């Protein structure tokens, strides 16, 4: 009996080391600008979950068939055909976003907005925020801050709102927290060779915990200041992680053979660790 009890204790200990993976819903739908790097983000986030064994990924993706923008000088018939196609596509988008209904979110531990843009037709926008506040994770990547400009409660949850960006540049990101899993692997300064750098409005440094900042304007190096790049914050009992980085495929994917690579594979690997650490922190897997 003593041997059996010892084996049982050992088995329970092993089981505790292999917790059930968390469940993430990764949203990549857009009604505004659509980044070409979105499929790369989908691939890498899914791979990070598989490789770590810490979370699974379900995708909320852009429905096919979105009509191209109506050309200037279009005829009445062309406008009517466009409006019909746009209306049908919007119906399919709403159906896809039903996955973010409060009822369906009960099955998930966190949601990632990966370069979403525009005013997404969620079934219950306030219900979505209430779900985060109740103790769930929200992760925003790059253009997540270019989403819901007309929904102040979302911007307050996120901690900042996209204002504008200039040309892609090389920047030095200053690490503000060497203990957070999103930045623990980075040195005091993380240099990116080329990336689209966002500027923000409705951002208050006293209401977030900065992870990466710049102390110089990305396009005007002579202008000193506080320029946020990545942060985290509580939201009720939930946790929010946001990084503005992730425009270029070569900052996301470490494949050395990517066309027009400007950032080294090592930078991409560091970025992947940045995303993974942010997800782990938001899900409560790591502190």
Image: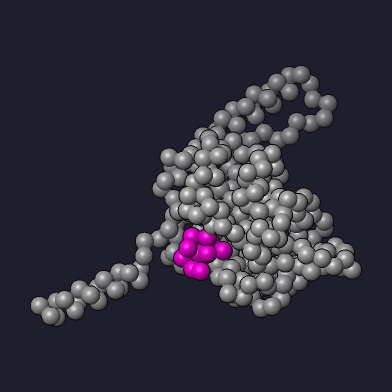
In-front residue for pair 56/228: 228
**Residue 33, located in which quarter of the rendered image?**
top right
Q: Is residue 143 visible?
A: no
Q: Is residue 158 visible?
A: yes
- Given the current orientation, which residue lies at the most extreme front position? 206
Magenta stretch holds residue 127: no
- Given the current orientation, which residue lies at the most extreme left position? 1
Q: Position of residue 208 (x, y in %)?
A: 65, 60
Please give the range of residues in magenta.
Answer: 278-287
Which quarter of the rendering shows the N terminus? Answer: bottom left
- Given the current orientation, which residue lies at the most extreme right position? 222
Q: Position of residue 151 (x, y in %)?
A: 66, 40
| Left or right, 273 with reference to 14 | right
Q: Main secondary structure of the magenta part?
A: helix
Magenta stretch holds residue 284: yes
Count how many numbered circles sit on residues in the image.
0
Q: Position of residue 141 (x, y in %)?
A: 63, 56
Q: Residue at x 49, y 68 (%)?
A: 286
Image height check: is 106 above or below 179? above
| Left or right, 215 with reference to 43 | right
Q: Residue at x 60, y 31 (%)?
A: 90
Image height check: is 252 above or below 11? above
Q: Position of residue 125 (x, y in %)?
A: 56, 39
Image height check: is 139 above or below 281? above
Q: Residue at x 60, y 44 (%)?
A: 29
In-front residue for pair 74/57: 57
Image height check: is 105 above or below 184? above
| Left or right, 123 with reference to 209 | left
Q: Residue at x 76, y 19 (%)?
A: 76
Here the colouring is: one colour
């Amino acid at each position: 009996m003593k041997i059996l009890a010892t084996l049982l204790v050992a088995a329970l200990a092993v089981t505790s080391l292999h917790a059930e993976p968390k469940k993430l819903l990764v949203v990549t739908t857009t009604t505004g600008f659509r980044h070409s790097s979105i499929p790369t983000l989908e691939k890498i986030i899914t791979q990070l979950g598989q490789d770590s064994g810490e979370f699974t990924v379900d995708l909320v993706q852009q429905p096919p068939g979105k009509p191209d923008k109506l050309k200037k000088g279009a005829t009445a018939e062309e406008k009517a055909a466009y409006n019909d196609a746009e209306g049908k596509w919007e119906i399919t988008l709403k159906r896809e976003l039903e996955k973010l209904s409060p009822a369906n979110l009960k099955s998930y531990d966190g949601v990632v907005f990966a370069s979403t843009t525009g005013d997404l037709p969620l079934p219950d926008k306030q219900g979505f925020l209430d779900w985060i506040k109740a103790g769930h994770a929200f992760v925003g990547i790059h253009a997540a801050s270019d989403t819901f400009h007309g929904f102040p409660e979302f911007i307050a949850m996120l901690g900042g709102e996209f204002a504008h960006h200039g040309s892609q540049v090389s920047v030095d990101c200053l690490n503000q927290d060497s203990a957070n899993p999103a930045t623990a692997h980075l040195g005091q300064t993380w240099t990116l060779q080329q990336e689209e750098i966002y500027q923000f409005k409705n951002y208050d440094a006293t209401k977030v915990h900065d992870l990466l900042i710049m102390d110089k304007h990305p396009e005007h190096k002579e202008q000193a200041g506080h320029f946020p790049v990545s942060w985290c914050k509580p939201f009720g009992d939930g946790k929010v992680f946001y990084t503005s980085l992730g425009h270029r495929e070569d900052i996301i994917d470490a494949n050395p053979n990517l066309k027009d690579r400007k950032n080294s594979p090592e930078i991409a690997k560091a970025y992947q660790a940045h995303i993974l650490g942010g997800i782990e922190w938001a899900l409560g897997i790591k502190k």
